[in-house]
Amino acid sequence: MIEMAEKNYYSMTTKRFTLRTAHNGWLSATRKFYNDVLYFYYKLFLEHPEFYSLTNQKAMRALECLSIVGRDKKPVANPLPWEGVPLYFRRAAINSALAAGKSYLSREEQTCPSQEFSSGITLYKGMYKDLDSHSIRVKVWNGEKWCWIHGRLSGSEIPADASCLSPRLVFREKQIELHVPIRQSVSNRGTLKQRIGKELRICAVQFTNGDSIAVCCVMNRDYTVEAVKFFRGGTAYMNRCQRILDKIEKSQKASPKETDKDANKKYWKKLKDIHEDISHQISRKIVNFSKENNADIVILPKYDSAYSKYVMAAVGKWSPLYVSYSIRRQLQYKAWQEGIFVLDSSVSDIGRVCAKCGAPVQRKGELFFCENGHQGNRWVNSACNLGKKAYESLEKHI
């Protein structure tokens, strides 16, 4: 998500940490308490459908008026059955209840409302303090009273220039995580239109289904190639995925009655983690390469629906080419954080003609040859053609 305030630009991302503490039991007790409060307000909200059209702030105030005794000490219609619930703990639970309640009421078919919740805990101010990349203090319910505990964090880093928003405790099967939304100022080097009017430099990216997951070509407006980079790892990625898929197949044969998802949950999670890891690595390397070579725009190939439907289906979900879906998504915010735009460009004929002379090419493996004697890597040739098409399109806006 991108926020803009006049000439200031910001990016919003989430840093994920593993939280370690000596009081996991207290955190679990706090989670149960949070979900009990959430369920109380969820039921109360559903009993008052007139609140549905209100903004969250007004709906929260209406629910508090029904459940919290004010300064006038007058009895309320639906008193909260617990005493001493911290204000911001309660309001975080109410916000979660409003989201769940509005989601339920918006459904075309409303069956049975939720009877319980197992949500993570959003920590508003007053419920945490001393947050940095290595530790945090959290206010928890130990079953008898509220107290502060210290937690150690690992797995990520909060940039020095970032502002942290309300973190969230997420309870996994084997660990507790802290997800921290951060807001960072983005270096603004002008709008796209302003950059087009200058010495524009682009980084064209071609995805492959081989060891080179992405091939990047940095070009100037006169089509001069300034730098080329192969980001490899596709073969190792396929091999890792295949070993896990083999384990899943073996497990399925050994336990044919169990469902595919339940019997091999840890394996499917491992596949997902490997996919996310390599897509993050490649997307970060593309951004760093673009930045090192002063590229203003990253150009990605724009495929039609038929390509997505048939080609991606043919290569399979755990192929290097399929990783390009995630790389695209991650490039959007990573490039934006560095002040780099990301655009799509037509892929029409980029692999069929020579980038140097425009003559038809013949392809053999990863090589190409044209009738005028030019030859080289076919993926670099495609990336160069992609860059040329992007320039031709951008020139129309000058």
Image (cartoon, grey):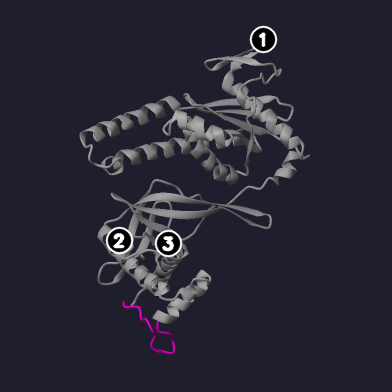
Q: Earlier in the sequence, mark 1 or mark 2?
A: 2
Q: Residue furthest left?
A: 254
Range shown magenta: 68-82
Give coordinates of residue 30: x percent, y percent.
Answer: 31, 65
Task: Name the residue that disc number 2 marks.
Answer: 27
Q: From the viewer's perspective, is the residue at label 1 or at label 2 nearer?
A: 1
**Is disc 1 surrounded by few (<14), some (14 to 19) or many (20+) residues within 10 Å?**
few
The amino acid at mark 3 is Glu
- Residue 280 visible? The answer is yes
Q: Residue furthest front?
A: 109
The amino acid at mark 1 is Gly
**Is disc 3 surrounded by few (<14), some (14 to 19) or many (20+) residues within 10 Å?**
few
Task: Name the residue that disc number 3 marks.
Answer: 109
Q: Is residue 158 above or below residue 229?
A: below
Task: Name the residue that disc number 1 marks.
Answer: 373
Q: From the viewer's perspective, is the residue at label 2 or at label 3 nearer?
A: 3
Image marks 1 and 2: residues in contact by CB distance under 8 Å: no
Q: Earlier in the sequence, mark 1 or mark 3?
A: 3
Q: Is residue 288 above or below residue 156?
A: above
Secondary element at image label 2: helix
Quarter where residue 267 is shown: top left
Frontmost residue, 303 versus 57: 303
Give coordinates of residue 231: x percent, y percent.
Answer: 51, 28
Frontmost residue, 348 versus 355: 348
Q: Is residue 398 above or below residue 224?
A: below
Secondary element at image label 3: loop
